[in-house]
Amino acid sequence: MIDKIASFGRSGADLVISIGRAGRFLAGVLSGVPRPKTGFPLLMKQLYSVGVLSLAIIVVSGLFIGMVLGLQGYTILSDFGSEAAIGQMIALTLVRELGPVVTALLFAGRAGSALTAEIGLMKATEQLSSMEMMGVDPLRRVIAPRLWAGFIAMPILAIIFSMVGIWGGMLVGVEWLGVFEGSYWGNMQASVDFWDDVVNGIIKSVVFGFVCAWIAVYQGYDCVPTSAGISSATTKTVVYSSLAVLGLDFVLTAVMFGNF
Amino acid sequence: MTQRTTDITVGLFMLAGLAALLFLALQVSGLSPKSAKSTYTIYADFNDTGGITPRGRVSMAGVTVGSIDSITLNKETFQARVAMSIHGDVDNIPADSAAVIRTSGLLGEQYIDISIGGEMDSLQPGDTFYSTQSAMNIERLISNFASGK
């Protein structure tokens, strides 16, 4: 009994310690002054692997989610004879919620897990410690470009996701089910506000990108340097990122769109 | 992959993001340069604004000619004072026109419709509509009907 209580307390203390370490780690990464000459090519390389290579999954998922929204929305809205509102439904759903959230979830699975595994393997093969031996700061050389790349790539991916989704919804709603194209775009333009909806969605995706990249690089940097350790760190990255994104999404939605 | 190819693909990626942002701004949210053109403000006092909201539509013969700026309560008359901005090129609204709150469709959004009057003088910026017609309230209609008024 005492053992159980003790282990419960220990896991609580461990949680607080790891949050503290993650915060200190983040401060260490961000406090390094970037060197444009050497830092920029590294950032480009990470933007390529984190952003450009995630584009395919983002575009395909966005297209299908938009098409499903169009189909499902049409079925429900046509019961009320208001299928013309389908454009506004799809656009608001994507721009406010699904765009940032689904992109972040896909990003955590596609790019976050790769970041964790890469950094974890670097740690397991002692590349990070040998960098330190050579006087190269691994936080600045390895971690910082990856963190910034996730931070920059995520909003771009979310915007592309929303755009492709809206286009996919038009494909189903207008081309296939025969909603009038003018009312599709017209209702959308009348109800979507650039600052209230689009920009708030982008702010959301910036926050999600930051959190996902932070969790991914921290889990990689902090993992137990064995094969089992790397695999559990990769799992933790996806699980923690998804939970953090969904939880933060509720808070951000309440702040941005809840009128109170 | 050489640094140059990486730079080019990342550049294209950034441009795709920018293009998507432009699409969201212009096509989806209708943030067009022409909405920045000059407008003037006129006012209307309603007994009941029903469901109209700021950013809502102001139309004339079904054509959108402006939008609702703000809805405030006039504490002296206990009426709602609605400020609406009308496109600058619609500058000949007759002075005896009426502002009417209508509903598009049975369940649709509410908007302000300007029913045209016949006077030669036109409303100037800052003027207030002489006559208004408040939102139709179905509950009130039913209760009036039930009580036989």
Image (cartoon, coloured by chain):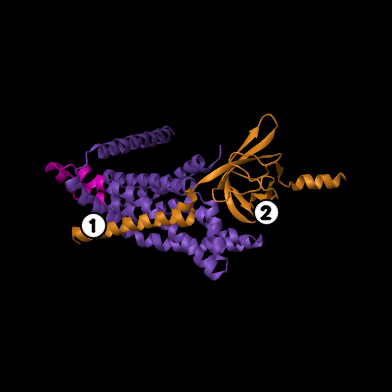
Q: Which residues are magenta?
A: A118-145
**Residue A255 locus on image (x, y percent):** 49, 39
- Give the residue displayed 46% in from the left and 49% down from the top: A198
Q: Secondary structure at mark 1?
A: helix
Most extreme residue toward the bottom is A176
Q: Main secondary structure of the magenta part?
A: helix
Give the vertical position of B44 relative to A104 (above or below). above
Label 1 environment density (alpha carbons within 10 Å; few <14, some 14–19, many ≥20) = some
* Residue that carries the numbered disc 1 in the rendered image: B7
* Residue that carries the numbered disc 2 in the rendered image: B107
Callout 2 amino acid? Leu
> What is the display colour for chain B?
orange
Q: Are marks 2 and 1 on the same chain?
A: yes
- Give the residue displayed 36% in from the left and 47% down from the top: A209
Most extreme residue toward the front is B120
Quadrant in the picture for residue B54: top right
**Residue B106 locus on image (x, y percent):** 70, 55
Give the vertical position of A64 relative to A192 (above or below). below
